[in-house]
Image: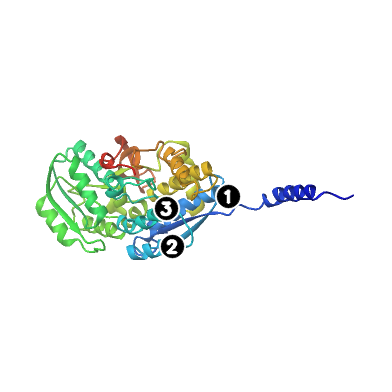
Amino acid sequence: MHHSPFIRLAAAAAFFVAFGGAQAQAPVSIGFITTLSTPAGYIGQDERDGFQLAVDEGGGKLGGIPVKLVVEDDALKPGNAKQSADKMLQDGIRLFTGINFSNVLMAVAPSVLQAGGTYVSLNAGPSGYAGKMCHPGYFDAAFQNDSFSDTPGMAANDLGYKKMVILAPNYQAGRDALAGFKRVYKGEVLAEMYTKLDQTDFSVELARIRSLAPDAVFQFHPGGAGINLAKQYANAGLADKIPMITPVYSIDRRMLEAVGAAGKGYYVSALWSADLDNPANKHFVEAFQKTFKRQPTDYAAQAYDTARLIGSALKATGGDVTAKVDAFRAALRQADFETVRGQFKFGPNQHPIQNWYLLRVEQGADGKLDYKTIRTIAKDHTDVYAGECKMQ
């Protein structure tokens, strides 16, 4: 029997739909630049692992869309990160996350945004991108830097500290941290000290703190510097006399394990805690421990949330982050995902509106130090820069 060319074409088209359509969708590449080496390398590892956990739970997919993580170590050098990002952009990648340090982010975000890409920060929150430099393609799923420092300022007021010494490294996030603290703190700042980003010896600063005898100290030193500072503060006999109040990023779980008893009594501001009572968090903490044989840090929790946020937007656009970039960004703005923080939404500058908690490092029933959530410092907390944001 002789078929007309039209019928043969129709049959071929049906065959193509049936079998061509069954071919696996090409994965969406996500540029994941983070700090995996240097003493701060554990931070990037936790971020990568938290993000990867969400991908693995989706069977290699986020929001039902196959994804491929392209991971690069920035070694905490802005130039390295920019080089990696430029190479990824040349390779056609248009969706980025992973950067931990604000100075590194400031070197990468402009390239990504100029190329029409989308950057979703899982940690760093420099003030510029929350305010005057805000951009439809830039999202922060973690916090704006001032939030982890103005909330300790609120807590210091509540705790009745009238005189304080404040210190942080002299880089973008450190300057943001001290500015944020001073904006809300009602007492007297006896001294404001800037340390080097890679400083290991704090004897000069500790001697000055001792002579000033403040009611408490506020400091922001993430990673290795914070570990050294905590140990030296305790060894100098200051920990017993002068309370320390910090963001959780100055005494995260891995740091707490490293400093041991030196971390006891720390007051900590945090947007997340392992003991937050919501189903997503309980699942995450259990799954992370089971998979990686260690407790998750805040960095891991933020990365997990970021992955699920990205998944919600990939799902909405069928994984198209280029031709449908506006729809993808609109879906991100909806923040339609289950968060380990209990609640999360974006403000008009695409930075979070969320609760911040006061934790205290205390000995648990097992004798080990752990964080105990004491109370909510700020409900639906946002940042002060949103008013300067005129979204293009």
Helix, strand or loop under label 1: loop
- Please indicate, yes or no, whether residue 342 appears anywhere in the rendered image: yes
The mark nearer the N terminus, 2 or 3, is: 2
Q: Name the residue under label 2.
A: 72
* For residue 356, above or below residue 262: above
Q: Name the residue under label 1.
A: 59
* For residue 85, above or below residue 60: below
Please name the amino acid that badge 3 sits on.
Answer: Gly
Q: Please identify the residue farthest to the top as the structure is shown.
A: 379
Q: Mark 3 points at which residue?
A: 116
Helix, strand or loop under label 3: loop
Residue 58 location in percent, x, y? 55, 47
Residue 350 location in percent, x, y? 36, 42
**Quadrant position of residue 41:** bottom left
* For residue 170, above or below residue 134: below
Q: How crowded is mark 1: few (under 14 residues within 10 Å), some or many (20 or more)?
A: few
Labels 1 and 2 touching (C-beta < 8 A): no
